[in-house]
Image (cartoon, grey):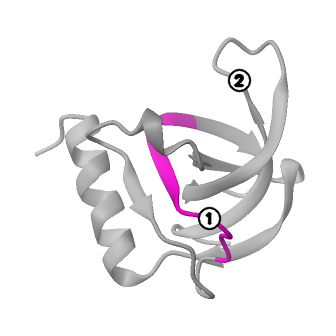
């Protein structure tokens, strides 16, 4: 697994009250963990730092979706249920730009 891979993971709700199996994009990987942003099909939640993805054979998504860059979590590799696909080079560049904006990096 690598940055830009789209995986299926058990992702916690922001209030930690429950979890949901959902796609997420890997932002970083270590020996035991991944840091990821979750992906949603709820397009009405779109924020300025989200990345819009259209379904493709490359990303493995079935519907138009948003990478919610503001929804970042570090998870054990054990929670990864499978690989769905990966971002294209252009989508990865968009993700990097949105993360820079979100984290106020120059």
**Residue 27, position as x, y percentages in the image:** 51, 55
Residue 72, compared with residue 85, is above or below; it is: above
Q: Main secondary structure of the magenta part?
A: strand
Q: Quadrant of the N terminus?
A: bottom right
Disc 1 element: loop
**Residue 99, position as x, y percentages in the image:** 31, 47
- As drawn, the label of residue 4 is none
> Which marked residue is nearer to the observer: mark 1 or mark 2?
1
Residue 93, compared with residue 40, is above or below; it is: below
Q: Are marks 1 and 2 in contact (CB under 8 Å)?
A: no
At horizontal 27% and vertical 50% (from top left) the residue drawn is: 98
Spatial CA span between label 1 and label 2:
21 Å
Residue 1 can be seen in this image: yes
Q: Is residue 70 left or right of residue 42?
A: left
Q: Quadrant of residue 103?
A: top left
Q: Is residue 74 left or right of residue 10?
A: left
**Residue 49, position as x, y percentages in the image:** 30, 42
Q: Residues within 10 Å of mark 1 (few under 14, many from 20)?
A: few
Q: Viewer-proximal residue, 3 or 23?
A: 23
Residue, disc 1:
63
**Residue 61, position as x, y percentages in the image:** 65, 70
Residue, disc 2:
13
How many marks can you see? 2
At horizontal 64% and vertical 53% (from top left) the residue drawn is: 24
Disc 2 element: loop
Q: Which residues are magenta?
A: 60-72
At horizontal 45% and vertical 37% (from top left) the residue drawn is: 44
In magenta stretch: residue 25? no
Q: Is residue 95 left or right of residue 67?
A: left
């Amino acid at each position: 697994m690598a940055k830009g891979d789209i995986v299926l993971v058990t992702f916690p709700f922001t209030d930690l009250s429950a979890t949901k199996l959902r796609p997420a994009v890997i932002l970083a990987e270590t020996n035991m963990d991944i840091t990821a942003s979750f992906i949603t099909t709820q397009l009405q939640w779109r924020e300025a730092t989200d990345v819009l993805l259209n379904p493709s054979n490359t990303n493995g998504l079935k519907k138009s979706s948003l990478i919610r860059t503001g929804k970042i979590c570090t998870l054990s590799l054990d929670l990864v249920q499978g690989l769905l696909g990966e971002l294209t080079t252009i989508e990865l560049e968009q993700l990097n730009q949105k993360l820079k904006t979100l984290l106020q990096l120059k």
